[in-house]
Image: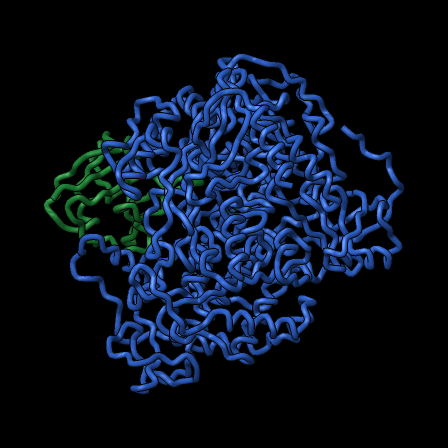
Chain colours: A blue, B green
Amino acid sequence: MREKLRVEKQARANSMRPGKWIPTTCKMCLHTCAMVAHVSNNGVVDRIQGDPTCPSNKGKNCVKAVTGVERNYDPYRLKRPVKRTNPKKGPGEDPGWVEISWDEALDLVASKMKKVVEKDPREFIYAITDFQKIYNWAWPAIIGNGNQFHVVGTYCGGAYHVTAGIYNSAFAGVGDYERCNYWIQCGGGDGFSSHLHVAAGQRMMSDARARGMRVVCVEPRLSTSAAKADEWVPIRPACDRHFVLGLCHALMYEHKIYDTEYLKWFADGGYLIGDDGWFMRSSTEKTLPPEGRPAGSMRWFQQTREERYKPLVWDPVDKRAKAFDDPTIKDISLEGTYEVEGKIVRPAFQYIKDAYKEYTPEWTEKITSVPAATVRRIAKEFGEAAQIGSTITLDGEVYPYRPASFNWYRGAQGHKYGTMDNQSYILLNMLVGSYNAPGGLLGVVLGSPHMVWTDEPGPDGLIDPKPHQLHPEIPFNWPPNTTTLMEIMPLGVDPGQFNMLTLREPEKYDIKFKPSTCLLYHSNTTWSMVGNVDKWYDILRGFDFIWAIDLFHNETTTFADVILPDQTYLESWALLMCEPPATEGLNCRQPVVEPLGECRDGYEILAEVAERMGKLKEMNEIYSFITGLVNDPGLMLDVNKRYTHKEFLDHCARYWTKTVWPPERGLDWFAANGHNVVWRPPQHKYYMSNKRGRDMRRPFFCEYILKQKQHLEENMAKVKMPFKWDTSEYVAFPNGRLSPVHSEPPEFDMYAITFKEHFMNFTENLSIPWIREIVDRDPHHVGLIMNPKTAKAKGLQEGDYIEVRSQFGHLSGWLVYTEGIHPEVIGISNATNRTVSHNPVTRLGGGQFNTLLGNDFDYTDHVTGAMETVARVKITKLPKPPLPKKY
Amino acid sequence: MTLNVTALLKVRELLGWSQKAVEFTGGTLDQLLKEISTIDGRTLYDIFVQNDGGISSDYLVWLNCRPVKQIHSLDIPLRSGDKIIAMPAIAFRAGG
């Protein structure tokens, strides 16, 4: 073996021509692994590997990173602007692309955009999904436009980010790899295959497993995480919350394991709740504005114009209710029923516990199919692993030590009641005190380095909720100005799926304008959007003009009128925040090779279009605002100057280092050094968890969500809306309400789920030969996977050609057996979905998973706009078509 | 005291300037808005503040990187060196 490795290493070395290594940053997914690229003396990149100096991925990278070379030199890359000559649009139509000059392309785009601006800026609609240049998402704001064609996708954590913001001022969360001992993984791939910072996560997960951390994976499918876990718990889809409610019941009622210290002093578990379901507040003690405004204090932002009386807690020593911040409080009751000012009240913990009495492990088993005994055992193991009461000293500070984490992502919350799903997982971590504690679940702040704050005091002694992690709140307005109806989702994240409703039947939703011009920027919208794909094609046909910025053709750009060729990450600049919580700092991406053909940087394409539209000033202002440069007069962009992308990033580098990671450093420093990433110190990583009295309790009972509901209802009552918008999903704590997928007509007797591996993310990756080869060797990714017992009961056998049909759409494919799937489920890999190809490497599938999904109000989480990503389907055998062509 | 005021987009056009160190005799945010005049003789307070005393949903005011929302009281005491950003409320899709 050693000899084989030596020979392989030598062979690799021999294949590389003399050259140099250049530090840069990967972009084969949205994360930001530091890497080094080897570039030969004749200017060809021939090898990519992890940057060993970066403490996050420590020289590791994933398979995608290596294939970046193939993406860069893909012979099917767009190298010059192209214009369609065939006005007929559709997947079967040849667009008749002809190459045109940049001048002609930009003139055409700018003239169309100017017309829109002159007529009605709301007629512009866009899908911008380059996560590493997140400032470009704000480009449409230069014309005051916010019509998002697509943001939240099937694979995104729509509700996840909102709840992380409300409960933790964070964008995401992940278990503490360094100190966790018991990790429940539910519907996510952290540490194994996907979600946050894969290469770093895999490395840290390996280290954690080597020191003995146990992993229990709860999923309908034997995923990569489940296959490598200590235990796989197969679960019926779309009921992970019900599994967790069962864990909460078992911890509260049977094992009696919960962190009373945390619930009393670091959460609002002791706040008294009236029978009306709201905080019981003092009738005399108001929250008063602070005296003056001490430097650095943001307490003024707790002060609202409406009078606010203080919530009460029950002091069992003095046997009376006191304001939550009363300095005489000796202890706080979590349980019991009390009478205060003639009203019967219960502490929030008791209130929730009473509501969870019915969620027994037996109830859980009926819904989830997970045996009651398993629910009880896992609850006990999780509770005991949390070591409630223990402490750890880090850098001289004593912290609570809670080495148990419930970790989740897309699959566990991409559902109709996604907000409640997320609330339940947070609540479980809070119950054992592991939320933000060493060993527990840690907040991950967004990659906008100017957002230097994380948690801050808000009203009522609670953390200031920051649900709007991606953009400021869209204020209520009717009729709406957005086709995603963001005006009625004060906590929402741009439900792009609503475009299918509002663009097809605008009058039903009071939409008074008709989008005519569309920008697709690194977005294969029809491929990633939920709902019947033929209807999306109709919508695309309805736009007068579509312009795209991309590397390749795809299913959606097939409908474009002009495509402008972007540069790859090996040809362009970026400056990226290295994902916390383990590390923090910036990774620099720099051009390591000359761009192919006439490809241009996406930022510079947008700047050129803005200038030709007469909107350069606005672009500089918007980009200054969202990057924080506006706060530094010396670094704010000059509104009259046209910046290169590199110049713009130099301003960002100086501002972000000056304010967050001093000393001030320009982009040239990053180009030479690659990154300034360091391990996060404990006081950043475990924020607030060891500090009493910081007025930042986490909301075990989230009255804030009830307030949002109340404001929305008041606003909606003032206008006449042509449809009913249900607000019953706004709840202070999660309940056992079931997704409508569980009550569809009985002939739809199977659940359909989709899945991927980290190397298959983004449409483009499936056209990379090395990735295609890996995918094609895995039977799970070339067919529709089903448990053999279920298949046989339906008279099906492996190799049959089958149709999967839901109420909304259908697809077909070849049946593949696997024991690694729940018997009620058919699994449909992301790799089988392609329907249009520019590249013979891409294998076309029998249809797209998303077409099976409902995309109307009934299948959308009304709080955040997250969508149900599980379908109910029936399966029938079809005559076998000719075998697909081999490439 | 000196405050750093930045006006973006339409607010820049209303004021005729983009950034300014504003000398302020002291007081609160609503008083500052009353002291800043637009080209057409109104004040930012006239334009930004609605009848109930809150910031109109058509505008955004940020104080030291934090949004002053409709629900907030505007009698926030200002301090020398505070940074105020005023702009129309347009739909961003990133950062913020």
Q: Residue furthest front?
A: A3
Q: Residue at x 20, y 39 (%)?
A: B4
Left or right: where A819 falls relative to A271: right
Percent coordinates x, y for residue A131 in the rendering: 48, 38
Count of numbered marks: 0
Percent coordinates x, y for residue A830 in the rendering: 67, 43
Percent coordinates x, y for residue A575 in the rendering: 40, 34
Q: Residue at x 59, y 21 (%)?
A: A78
Viewer-nearest residue: A741 or A133: A133
The image quarter in which residue A645 lies: top left
Left or right: where A418 falls relative to A843: left
Left or right: where A703 falls relative to A214: left
Viewer-nearest residue: B88 or A835: A835
Residue A860 visible at all: no
- Residue A791 vs A93, above or below: the answer is below
Percent coordinates x, y for residue A273 in the rendering: 42, 75
Viewer-nearest residue: B50 or A469: A469
- Residue A248 vs A721, above or below: the answer is below
Instruction: Report the quarter where the N terminus of chain A lies.
Output: top right
Residue A697 visible at all: yes
Instruction: Report the quarter where the C terminus of chain A lies.
Output: top right
Left or right: where A318 falls relative to A372: left
Viewer-nearest residue: A757 or A678: A678
Q: Residue at x 56, y 43 (%)?
A: A496
The image quarter in which residue A778 lies: top right
Q: Residue at x 44, y 67 (%)?
A: A402
